[in-house]
Amino acid sequence: SLLRFFHNHGFLGLHTQHPWWTVDGGSREYVKRLVAPFADRIRLGCAVTRVIRHGGAGNAGRGGSTPRGVSVLTADGGEHAFDRVVIATHGDQALRLLVNPTREEERLLGAFQYQSNVATLHTDITVMPRAARAWASWVYQVSRDKTGRVIPATHYWMNRLQGVSEREHYFVSINLPGQIDPAKVIKTIAYEHPLFDLAAQAAQVELPGLNAAARGATETYFAGSYFRHGFHEDAFMSAVNVAELLLGRDPWAAAPAAAPVPAA
C-alpha cells in the first residue's frame, strides 16, 4: 500500500515527481460548475438515513404495497422514491445506509476501513523545519508524547501547494492540534481517511463489477474516492464511470437528438 502511494505520487525516483495543478478558487469552484444544471434540486441539511431496495419479499412499502425502485429515507422523516440511486459516500457509510445489503455489497464495501484525523488550518510556522530551505509542500513529522507514544503528523504548506497568499504562511496540519499556537488556529476540521490495506486493494478491483451487476437488480450504484487512491480525482473518475454506465455513453458527449415524431 505504501509503495503504491509513493508510485502514484512519483516519489520512487529522483525526477519523477508530478507537477501539481490547482483549481483557481479551490475545489468548491469545480463543484459549483458541476452542479449548476441541477442546483435547484439539491437538498441540503437533509441527511439520508436509510436506503431501501424494493421488489423482494419483506421489502413492502410503508403502506403495505410492494413498489419497485429504491426508497431513500431522510432524517426529517421523509421517504423519497427513485428508479435508481447513486451513493457517493465513504465505503463503510454506504454499507450502513443499505437495508438488506447483498452478500457482495457486504463483502466489498465492508473491506474499507477509515481512520479519524484532525485537520487544523493555521499560521504557526513552528510546525515547519527551522531551516527554511528544508520547507516542502508536505512535511512529515514524528514526535512523542509524555508517555513515549509515537505521534505522526503531516503539515501541508498551502502557499506552495495552492498559492493562497504572498503575505503570510498558511498550513494545514494533520493530527497535531496540541502543539499549534491556539492564537494562530483558523479552523479545525474532523476527517476520516481511508486505510488502503490489502483487503481494501483487493476489493477495489471488484467495485466496477458491483456497479455493473446493479443494473436491473438492486439499481444501487456506488462512487467515491475509495475506488482508487482516495483523492478528489479518484472520486470524480468513479462518478464519471457510473454516469457512463447509466447513460450508456460518454457523459460529456452531447445527448443524441430525439427521433422525429411522424405526422399523423
Image (tube, grey):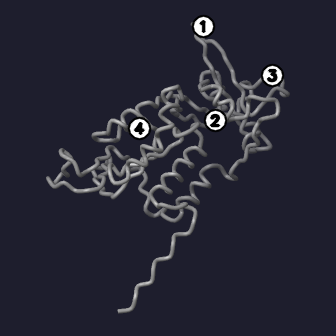
Q: Which residue is mark 2?
A: 121
Quadrant in the rendering for residue 142: top right
Q: Are marks 3 and 4 in contact (CB under 8 Å)?
A: no
Which tag, 3 or 4, sits closer to the chain's start? 4
Q: Residue at x 56, y 69 (%)?
A: 254
For the residues labelled 3 and 4, the Cα–Cα distance comes to 41 Å
Q: Which residue position is annotated with label 1?
A: 148
Foreground of the two, 34 or 60: 60
Q: CA distance from mark 2 to mark 4?
A: 26 Å
Tag 1: Cα neighbours inside 10 Å, few (<14), some, or many (≥20)?
Answer: few
- Tag shown at residue 130: 3
The numbered mark, 3 or 2, whose residue comes first in the sequence reads 2
Q: Amino acid at mark 2?
A: Leu
Q: How many marks?
A: 4
Relative to residue 34, is residue 223 depicted above or below? above
Label 4 neighbour load within 10 Å: few <14, some 14-19, many 20+: some
The residue at 47%/61% (across/down) is 247
Tag 3 and tag 2, C-beta contact below 8 Å: no
Quarter of the figure with residue 196:
top right
Left or right: 184 with respect to 102? right
The answer to which of marks 1 and 2 sits earlier in the sequence is 2
Q: Position of residue 233 (x, y in %)?
A: 61, 46
Q: Earlier in the sequence, mark 2 or mark 4?
A: 4
Please state the horizontal and vertical placement of residue 35, each as a whole percent of the image: 52, 59
Which residue has dot 4 on it?
93
Separation (CA) of disc 1 from disc 4: 34 Å
